[in-house]
Amino acid sequence: MKKLLLGMVFSALASAAVAADVSVPVYKAPPATFVSASGWYLSVDGAWRRVSLPDYALGSRQVVFPFPSTDGGPMQSFRQQRFDGSLIRGAVGYFLPPGTSNSIFGANTRVEMGGFYGRASGSQTGTAVSVTGAAAMQFLDGTLRNTSYLCNNAQICTTSANLSTSYSDWQLHGKIAGDYRVGAVLVTPSVALFGGNARTNQTLLQTLTLTAAPPGNVTYQASTSLRWTDVGARAGLDLKADVTPRVAVGLSGWAGLAGRHASLSGTDVAVDTVSGFHNGASALSVSSNATPFLANVEAGAAFNGCRL
């Protein structure tokens, strides 16, 4: 079972190391763009987004009989597919003089520095009941407290838990872009270098309650931190068409590669009020490197910028 737990840990870490984008913009505010007569511009926009994270399953586990016993999986797990949060983005750039524009990027060639910062949080609660096999406590470092409690019709094993999650990410980029006009559509190719960091901090509070004599419970608490750092390059393409002189609709997307370093650390502790068999504490720290393919596509409407 120790190998199974460590396999789950590295699987979660690998998921973080190769994931493309864990968030989806649900509503994006129209960007506000301000352009000066000297060629400098400032752009700011924001979004409400939904963040999805890997499933979370720590603490008490089921043991399946007959002997030799096998792992029956976690007694309780949380699917994390809907954490609401916010995102703000901004950029400052400069339009190169017309004579310096080139055939690669077309008209209005510009360079910019920009970035974003976002966060999301939430909490989940749940209860699970088992009347088969036995209950065991699995710690982060792979230590298993042996199957001390049978779960059957006479001894009902119930777990109840609360999971608190806090997610944040930021990124900076340097980009060069330009415009081409194809009929009524403005086509904007771009290339960019970027770097950033994302972090997920989570705390699980779980109680395993036993109904038979002697009744009691096992309390388990785990605190984990998953973070990854990206450095990479991407190519983008934006399409925009004016609906009215002040309103435009558009489609934008980008794709690229990043060098990613992901790390997972955590501590946990269990206190057994029945027999003490499940008492224990552990710590974990692992890391992994990957080169994920990243991509993003957005569609929306925007107000044309005003000139300062």
Image (tube, rainbow, N blue to C red):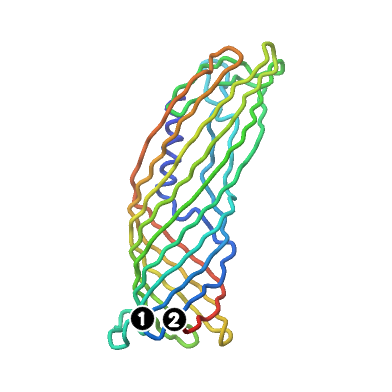
Count the numbered circles shown: 2
Picture layout, residue 170 above or below residue 221: below
Left or right, 183 with respect to 247, comes to left
- Which residue is rendered at x = 40% and y = 83% of the image? 180
- Which residue is rendered at x = 59% and y = 50% of the image? 82
Q: Classify residue 100 by image quadrant.
A: bottom left
Measuring from the top left, give residue 156's x and y in whole percent: 69, 20
Q: Which mark is residue 95?
A: 1
- Which residue is rendered at x = 58% and y = 84% of the image? 243
Q: Out of 28 and 251, give the one closest to the viewer.
A: 28
The amino acid type found where label 1 is placed reads Phe
Q: Which residue is mark 2?
A: 35
Q: Earlier in the sequence, mark 2 or mark 1?
A: 2
Measuring from the top left, give residue 173's x and y in whole percent: 37, 64
State if disc 1 and disc 2 touch (CB < 8 Å): yes
Q: Which mark is residue 8?
A: none
The amino acid type found where label 2 is placed reads Val
Measuring from the top left, give residue 218's x and y in whole percent: 59, 21
User: Furthest-front residue in view?
Assistant: 308
- Report the mark closest to the observer, 2 or 1: 2
- Which residue is rendered at x = 55% and y = 43% of the image? 165
Q: Out of 149 and 152, give the one closest to the viewer.
A: 149
Q: Classify residue 150 by image quadrant.
A: top right
Picture layout, residue 207 above or below residue 113: above
Q: Secondary structure at mark 1?
A: strand
Marks 2 and 1, how far apart at CA? 9 Å
Pointer 1: residues within 10 angstroms few (<14), some, or many (20+)? many
Measuring from the top left, give residue 253's x and y in whole percent: 45, 68
Picture layout, residue 124 above or below residue 181: above
